[in-house]
Image: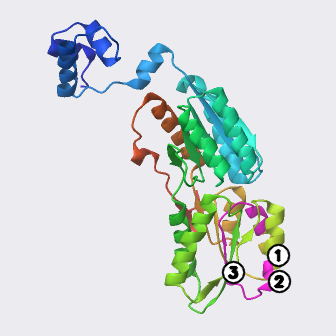
Amino acid sequence: MKPTVHDIAAKAGVSLATVDRVINLRPGVHAVTRAKVEAAISALGYVRDIAAANLAKGRSYALVFILPNNDNSFMAGLRAEVRAAASRSYLERTSIRIIEVPPFDAAALAQALEVARQEKPSGVAFVAIDSEDVVEATDRLGDSGIAAVTLVSDLTGSRRDHFAGVDNVAAGRTAASLMGRFLPKAGGDIAVLAGSMLVRDHRERLHGFRDVMENEFPDLRILPVLEGRDDPETVEHLATECFKNHPDLLGIYSLGAGNRGLIKALKASPLSPCVIAHELNENTTNALREGVLDAVLNQDAGHEVRSAIRVLKARADGLAVIEAQERIRIDIFLRDNLP
């Protein structure tokens, strides 16, 4: 049974009112008495239930989520998860506002972070773009006492509080290990489709992919990266041109979004390369079933949103984050283990 304030009062030989003043750091308690209460707390292993205390006090957490407004399936799903969290606001004592910005637009993101800072919320979560302006805007949040969590893509050199996303270097390494094992031993060309090298998650995936390929499968040559801006039409055009220019292409690693365009280009091409993509959705699930894609690496957007909310609330309360609870795993899906 967990110790209670009554147990603390009995052990320290003081009143419940005195215990309440010590726990809530209020004045009016003699130093000797405070020491007795703190010793009793330590001896009993009492841990205060901050959430219950906040509920009793009617405390609410104002949170801002800044998300790109591109229409790829993953970002649409991420926005849906934030809206779902907002619909539970009353139960979770939160008030969630969403600000949408153009994708890969660092200036717009920095401006949105400044708008959020002026609202003085408990915390801000956002999909980061590596830019000095964004780093400075993020650090101003910290200077204002506002917690910051990066979602999906982290921010190099910033003082953000937490990153809610997968280990993207590990994701890239996983994709390379799978592709290297799927392909025959003879060498050949591998295409890489990214959204933009402005975002850290895409750079980290490429770094992990390239590292494994160069060290473990040196006969497979990675072609220059194609940046499709996570736009299906742009990705379709880039993929189609790549197939024309490299008729012996062995593999494709799509480390960003816009996979509707890639799948369309693959279906229209006589080539049948090994293809590994990211994010499980209706399009990639169907493509796996049809054999158009060989594997999909997935991250749980809902877990990332829930993690961001937990971390922002914990930071607002001055509590430590439970790292194991907030670790986002990389799921690997083949045609054989689709949910």
- Marks 1/3: CA–CA distance: 15 Å
Amino acid carrying label 1: it is Thr
Crowding near the residue tagged with mark 2, few <14, some 14–19, many ≥20 C-alpha atoms within 10 Å: few
Q: Earlier in the sequence, mark 1 or mark 3?
A: 3
From the top left corner, tell me how far across and down residue 106 is, in percent. 72, 50
Residue at image point 54% right, 24% down: 93
Residue 127 in view: no
Residue stretch rendered in magenta on the structure: 242-262
Q: Which residue is mark 1?
A: 240
Q: Quadrant of the N terminus?
A: top left
Residue 224 in view: yes
Residue at image point 50% right, 65% down: 170
Q: Which residue is mark 3?
A: 223
As drawn, is 47 to the left or to the right of 276?
Answer: left
The answer to whether the residues at label 2 and label 1 have Cβ atoms under 8 Å apart is: yes
SS assignment at label 3 = loop
Residue at image point 60% right, 59% down: 201
Q: Which residue is mark 2?
A: 244
Is 252 in the magenta? yes
Among the 4 quarters of the image, the one containing residue 292: bottom right
From the top left corner, tell me how far across and down residue 127 is, in percent. 64, 48
Pair 3/2: label in front: 3
- Marks 2/1: CA–CA distance: 6 Å
Crowding near the residue tagged with mark 1, few <14, some 14–19, many ≥20 C-alpha atoms within 10 Å: some
As drawn, is 1 to the left or to the right of 110?
Answer: left
Amino acid carrying label 2: it is Lys
